[in-house]
Image (cartoon, grey):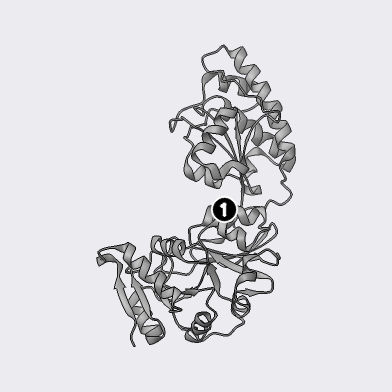
Amino acid sequence: MPPIVIDLRSAEDLRDVVHRAVQALAEGKLVAMPTETVYGLAVSARDEGAVERLLQAKGRGKDQPFSLAVKGTDDALDYVPQLSSLGRRLARRCWPGPVTLVLENDHPDSLLQRLPASVRELVSLAGTVGLRVPAHQLVLDVLQLTAGPLVLTSANRSGESDSLTAAEVVDSMGEDVQLVLDDGSCQFGQPSSVVRVVGDDLDILRAGVVSETTLRRLSSLLILLVCTGNTCRSPLAEAFMRRRLADILKCDAEQLDDRGVMVMSAGIAAMAGGRASTHSMEVAAQRGLDLSGHESQPLTDRLVQHADLILTMTASHRDAILAQWPSAAPRTEVLSTDGSDVADPIGGPVELYRSCADQIDGYITERSREIDVSTLIPVDRK
């Protein structure tokens, strides 16, 4: 029987389409879905019969593991409980998106142990598992309503070209697929990038949509300094942190990006494009630092999501961040190690700025010693 094809662009209620897809997966059917890369073919990872039918439909050997589509980073930790700092960094920055992470999965508490043995053999080879969170809302909605992960692979026969439209899926897979969700042509039209992460080392197995240079930049350590307006305290803290880390890495501050370290600052109530305050520039210059090129920026979802360490000038700044982004709690701390605040010098005399700079410099010196730079991956600019 030919597959049922549903055109998402003309569907009256997308929620109904999602429920039909979830029901089909629960019944062990093969469902073709659009992703941002190519069309994917999905089955429930909990259904060993469906996974076996997927293997037969693809016509591929068991030595080529399937990937699992999961809801997000929290789900990934269920399958890879000891995810390295690099793995967490890439998951935060690349998902949802066109990147598959191949991760170590030998932890006894991994939820992989709850999948059927025959399924584990097809998704986990050599102690690793490939995880992905596609950046397509339909797939994300289906994942939210599906018990367990999905086995997800490209919707084509092995050796054939990837399917970029629903019509190509039907031409390739024929009656082996039961439901096809049609959303037109895929956004990127090429496969996801595949990155193997072992501890704090990465290996690009397939460049795909995201280039190797971009992937290595996404692996950089990002330290974010936060105050209110991003014109006084946090620009000073950023400059001090850059100098301290450059000393540790024995390079110039301008070379930190190439060494796999990014240091930035932002303000909870900042306006974009403002200059550092006059007194901040003055006291920075007295310490051999140049803030003349600083441009203020507001704290955003993207900055919070990407930051590995967020250091705030006061406890109230931290509270404000956690009120809006509670998941950032493990990565957000007050700059001072004793929990005291760095008072805002704005509107005060230059002497107050000097005192503030001395205070920040002392805290930065302490904090920089705690940052482990031994696992940084240099950015290849070739």
Left or right of 21, for residue 369? right
Q: Is residue 3 visible?
A: yes
Q: Nearer the viewer, residue 337 or 354?
A: 337
Residue drawn at x 55%, y 71% is: 67
Amino acid residing under circle 1? Leu
Percent x, y of residue 278 = 52, 19
Relative to residue 300, is residue 103 depicted above or below? below
Q: Is residue 33 visible?
A: no
Please state, as top left, top right, bottom left or bottom right, where the N terminus lies in the image: bottom left
Please state, as top left, top right, bottom left or bottom right, where the C terminus lies in the image: bottom right
Within-10-Å neighbours for mark 1: few <14, some 14–19, many 20+: many
Percent x, y of residue 380 = 62, 56
Residue drawn at x 30%, y 67% is: 8
Relative to residue 178, is residue 109 depicted above or below? above
Element on which disc 1 rests? helix
How many marks on residues? 1
Q: Nearer the viewer, residue 233 or 150?
A: 150
Percent x, y of residue 159 = 49, 84
Relative to residue 272, is residue 5 depicted above or below? below
Q: Nearer the viewer, residue 19 or 103?
A: 19
Q: Which residue is mark 1?
A: 218
Residue drawn at x 62%, y 75% is: 120
> Which of the 4 image quarters holds residue 313?
top right
Left or right of 264, for residue 371? right
Residue drawn at x 28%, y 63% is: 13
Percent x, y of residue 293 = 52, 31
